[in-house]
Image (spheres, rainbow, N blue to C red):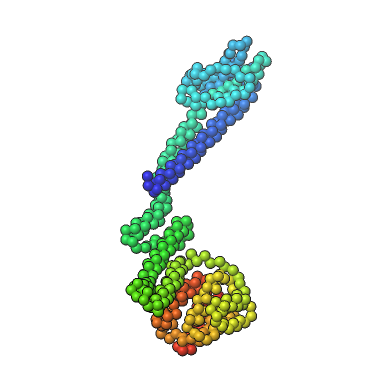
Amino acid sequence: MKLRNKINLYTSVLFAFLIIVMNAALFFLFSKMIVDSELDTARNELENLAQEIDQSLGQIPPADLLRAYAPLDGVIQIVQDVNGDLKSTIGSNSDENRKLLDEMDEQFYQSEQTEELVLGNQHYAFSSIPIILPDGEVANLQTVQSIQSAINILQLFRIVLVIVTLLTLVPVLISSRILSSFIMNPIISMIETMKDIRESGQFKQLKLEGKSKDELHIMGDTFNHMITLLENNYEKQKQFVSNASHEFKTPLTVIESYASLLKRRGLQDPALFEESVEAIHSEAIRMREMTEQLLLLAKHHEQWNIEWNDIQLKPFLLQTAKAFEQAYNRKISFICDGTSIVRTDEQKLKQLLFIFLDNARKYSDDDIILTCEKKNQKVLIHIQDFGSGIGEEDLPRVFERFYRVDEARTRQNGGTGLGLSLAKEMADVMGIQLELKSEKGAGTTVTLMFN
């Protein structure tokens, strides 16, 4: 059974059950109230009759007295228990009412008694109350009165409730259908979108209508977010494969050429052997670095696992500068105004700084200047070199993957064309703005801005 039909069936059955239970409870409660009211009325009337009849019993014959007080739709009688034998005196306005006594068991009660009787498909209120006769004997004054009019009203009320229940089930069925459609439409839309994606191979998103923020809207929004992640990862994968196949072609060709050269003449020419091994080793290192950078660039922002911490910027930059100096034996001039605290990922910020410092080292033989300052409520880090610089026409593209300003020089220095792309990706993840200023022949300044 489809989920839509299940929702429709379960909600309809549940609502129908609730309506039937409520109406049944209402009917039985109302019936009890009506019957109890009729019985109370019959008992109160009998108590009043007992007082009046007690005053006239010795003066008027019992049969005539009871006939005078007999109800129009019932009978009245006095029942005595004489040595274990029951003796009754009956008062009635019609022979038809007197037949009621033939259908009921004559009984003597020691205390007051009130109950409902069903005689010949007719409902009656029976009441009995003890009285004292003029000769001192104890007897029962009993009445049997019809309450069929109240029962007829209850039967009519029952028919009305049945009709109302049946009529109520119609909007219940319609509303359950609407409810199932309301719940299932986003799910069906999601299923159709998934089928389209599977058949066409193209990523698609749900069209979310309205401004509701219920669970169905959240589900659709989550689905769209998931599709966006899949699409981004798919595009990154395609780009990774394309970039890797393109960029690995050159070093693999170099390695293959030198390997072939070694195979033919390497043993006879030591200089050629040394040149070939050096070239193969250099290209292998470049391929390893390129692979590591490509894998980092293939990550989505949410997969970087940023560990946010507050760090003192001045000692952090000083430690980073000293580590770089020792690693590459290059002089770095460090200038920092005051003490600033930034919230960032310490390790990834260090990696980001190393990328720019390494670029400055490769393309400049002079000292590198590392400075920090606070300006307009923003913390700024500047990395300045005095190398060949970058032309104005190349500045907008330096963060593109595999873009090289000087192809020959970049290859000579072992660059992959991915360093600045990786730096831009990391900066975006950490919320750092990058600004690049350069002048041909005068050097380059990179600025990192923390909000």
Residue visible at 45% across and 43% down in the picture: 15
- Residue 171: horizontal and vertical position, in percent? 41, 47
Q: Nearer the viewer, residue 377 or 122?
A: 377
One can see residue 188 in this view = yes
Q: Nearer the viewer, residue 225 or 81?
A: 225
Residue visible at 46% across and 89% down in the picture: 441
The relative height of residue 167 versus residue 151 in the rendered view (above or below) is below
Q: Nearer the viewer, residue 127 or 328?
A: 328
Question: Going by the image, does 36 lie left or right of 261?
Answer: right
- Residue 168: horizontal and vertical position, in percent? 43, 44
**In which quadrant of the rendered image does the C terminus lie?**
bottom right
Q: Quadrant of residue 250?
A: bottom left
Question: Going by the image, does 184 lie left or right of 433?
Answer: left
Numbered circles on residues, count = 0
Spot the residue most to the front.
Answer: 268
Spot the residue most to the right.
Answer: 136
One can see residue 246 in this view = no
Spot the residue most to the left.
Answer: 199
Q: Nearer the viewer, residue 346 or 17?
A: 346
- Residue 327: horizontal and vertical position, in percent? 55, 77
- Residue 293: horizontal and vertical position, in percent? 45, 71
The relative height of residue 221 versus residue 252 in the rendered view (above or below) is above
Residue visible at 58% across and 13% down in the picture: 87
Spot the residue most to the top.
Answer: 83
**In which quadrant of the rendered image does the N terminus lie?**
top left
